[in-house]
Image (cartoon, grey):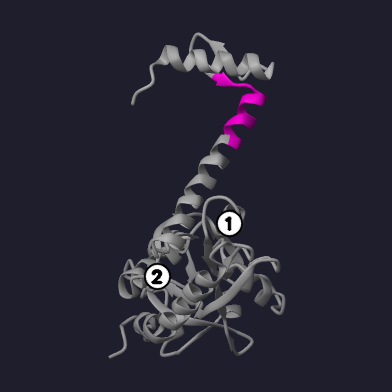
Amino acid sequence: MSVTQPAVSKQISRLETELAVRLFHRTPAGMMTTAAGQILLELGEDVLSRFERAEGIIRSRFRGIPSFRVACPHSTADILVSFMAARDAPIVDLEILLASELDGVLNREVDMAVSSLTPPSHRAQLAVATIPVLVQGQPRSNAPFGTALQVDLESLKDEWVIVPRSGVQIVVTRAMAGFDAPLMIREASTGTIAQALAANGHGYALVTEPARFGLQSLPAYAQDKPLEIVQHASWDANHYASDELRRLARDLRQWMTDEWEWRQRKQPNGQHPE
């Protein structure tokens, strides 16, 4: 069923009359929302989001088909799609966002968030993996490391290091607290962008992603300890399917332990282990 523009205009006018507020500015270029109109738009989007979640509840409870939406950064999405394919996980879609944006959508648009940032304490949560941070650079830029099996971050004090805005940035910042001098850090929004910059000689990428673009990897260390991030799954503790979400998180943790870690681990020369 279609709705014509005159019909929409009449509905808007009637709504403005009933509410006694102007919702739109009429201009020659079109219509723009007023402050009141913007609030109404945001509330309407929230209603639609809640309706979609209600549909999920009905499918899950009465048809036995749990279907969850998961928010995660781009790098984590690469992991989750493999998990979905391998385990037929009850995930219907992924919402790709920056790690810092994930918790804000948990109450509205998605059922679970997965990232390397520690969730707020009021969230139900589960650590699903511990992932090593890697130093990645061009083969010629890695030459100073010789046959080393790891890289001490403090040895990069005279080099640019490219760090994604994720849990990697947090652990690197903590590690630098014990250094004599801070590293020269260039931020990137994702690990993949950090890798692309490193591939063109703009510094060393500190990432958790498998090497690409011809880069070589070595584990990052600080004060003789490996640098690692913890991947967390989190969800609303009062979610209608909290038990099912915890089972999903546990299944992801098991898969990450059994399957993902050994497949992604790299030898110092950048090759997969046999």
Residue 40 inside the magenta-drawn segment: yes
Q: Are marks 2 and 1 in contact (CB under 8 Å)?
A: no
Where 194 sits versus 272, above or below? above
Q: Nearer the viewer, residue 228 or 114?
A: 114
Q: Which residue does the numbered mark 1 point to in the structure image?
A: 106
> Which residue appears at 40% of the width and 65% of the height?
64
Which of the two discs, 2 and 1, sits closer to the camera?
1
Residue farthest to the left? 274
Q: Would residue 169 be visible to someone looking at this image? A: yes
Distance in Å between CA atoms under marks 2 and 1? 20 Å
Q: Which residues are magenta?
A: 32-43
> Which residue appears at 40% of the width and 68% of the height?
80
Residue 63 rendering spot, x and y as whole percentages:
39, 61
Residue farthest to the front? 62
> Which residue appears at 41% of the width and 15% of the height?
5
Where 204 sits versus 51, above or below? below
